[in-house]
Amino acid sequence: MCGIYGYWDRKRRAMGEGQLATMADRLAHRGPDDEGLWHQPQRGIAMGNRRLSIIDIAGGRQPFVSDDGRVAVVQNGEIFNYVELAAELRAQGVELRTGSDTEVLLRLYEREGISFVGKLNGMFAIGIDDLRQDAMYLVRDRIGVKPLYVADDGTRVLFASEIKAMLPALRETGAAPAVDLEAVHHYLSFNYIPAPWTIWQNIRHVMPGTWMKFTRGGVETHRWWNLAEQREQDHRFNTWSEEFLAILDDATRIRLRADVPWGAFLSGGVDSSTIVGLMARHVDRPVKTFCIGFADPRFDESAFAAAAALRFGCEHTSEIAELNMLDRWPHVLFHLDQPHGDASFMPTLRVSELAARHVKVVLTGDGGDELFAGYEKYEQFFARPGVQALPPEAFQRGYFDSISLFAPQAKQDLYRPEIARQLTGIDSFAVAAKPWFDEAAHFDRLNQALYLDMQLLLSGNNLVKPDRMGMAVSIEARTPFLDWRMMEFAFRSRGTTKLHDGDKKHWYKRAVVPLIGEDLAYRAKQMFTVPVGEWFRRESHVWLTGVLHGSALLQQLFRPEAIDAMLQRHRDGSANFTRELRALAALALWDGHVRDHA
């Protein structure tokens, strides 16, 4: 786990060492243990790394450079099958001088070129400088567990693991980006900014499952993995269960590879309990598990976590946290770089802080809900009469509407007239959602909805959470459910295996009962969140009003009377605008605490 950064200048102009040092400093929390830089100013290329040392502590320093000095590699992340890949290389006569997974990347690329990425099982963002081609590659993992951003003005390319690392260099060159109004428009639909957009114009995500090749003449983009290539198959439960457990068990096993202490986040829900149960099978010492609870029983899962920890003989650490964490929100947004309306980032930071006192790596249950239909929204939407009989686009639009924060007309009513005119004709459904739906048109209706959430919600918000909040305190989060084998298996599984008569994760829960027990498998799902909406009605109403009215960006974009109407109706209980006000507050706090200070 690390942070990577660098530049590629098509005119071979060198970037200053001071600018590169600033980029490295902005990523120090992602890699406090070590740093390295490959800089060829005569070619206008640099790739740097801030390292969180996890595998081969002594020998894993990056960048890794080929013996002839013509290829250099940096990466953020971990290649979990590096042991098997190293064995293959040695069998072919390749000498490996370290136990580092990054050296494996270098040697594979030397032998196979960029096609080697298809062999990788991991979470990664990779930079490769190839002097032989006079080109630079940026590669992102299949589903976007690891972040990677790029700014390309046609002459100079900047890249980094976090946006904050790029902003000083952009500002120094007079190319400081402006807020992207279209990105804000999509934010109001999704509660996060969907990739490839970011809050800034001209800063974009490298898309998941994609590599980009930068040359003197331009850029080539290639999608090297596509989940939609799967085809649903019929299964018997016993066969399905056996394959499901075999894949998840092995995905968990290889994610225990580390030369530092590791543990797991444990809420006592089905996903985290399953992962911890599988971890316990592969070790000869208690698994270290971490949980935070709250005094309010509506949001407290600590008793379930304690029960799971007892079942698996874990070394369990739990703390009761202050429920009201609004004072942490600006700090959270600083690490996010962008507005996110999801309040659960705050408790995720809190449990990450707890775990960081004891371990450097945690395994999590992220991805299980999106793969196997774990959210209430799936049950609610697919229980509607006639959903399965809707024409394709009506179904797509219906699901999009069901997950949208602001409906299209509500956004227009919120905007100031001049902003509404600029955004007229930009349909968030058409440009951000429908292309993914169209890719998944051969899946059944539930899997189409899950596919959309895999591509947008998971990579745009839910994976941002463990990465940024973990990296804020320098710990690495690993996600066994997002092993590529499990993702492909999930989309070979029909929707009826996932949602049946309102039973979410239908076959999955049946499959894990022998491991975690019926009480944990079938307990009611609780969201890992805090009651922001209640605070907005009571003790935090004045604070919220000040935040919303004090933001220059909100004043520029939105009609004050529209915001006031939401505040008043929410406070008097005539409407519940929790999610809408939360999103606007995140945008305002980003504007006030992050926008000009990152």
Image (tube, grey):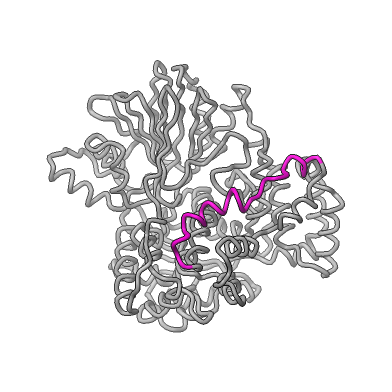
Does the segment drawn in magenta span residue 528?
A: no
Q: Position of residue 196 (x, y in %)?
A: 54, 43
Kindly identify the residue that appears in the image at 80 percent across and 40 percent down: 418
Is any atom of residue 404 visible in this view? yes
Residue 264 image-quadrant placement? bottom left
Q: Position of residue 479 (x, y in %)?
A: 41, 59
Between 518 and 178, the one nearer to me in the picture: 178
Between 53 and 427, the one nearer to me in the picture: 427
Q: Position of residue 84 (x, y in %)?
A: 22, 52
Span shown in magenta: 418-444
Is any atom of residue 49 visible in this view? no
Residue 490 image-quadrant placement? bottom left
Q: In the figure, 157 relative to 321: above or below?
A: above
Between 427 and 391, the one nearer to me in the picture: 391
Residue 241 image-quadrant placement? bottom left
Q: Tag count in the figure?
A: 0
Does the segment drawn in magenta span residue 426?
A: yes
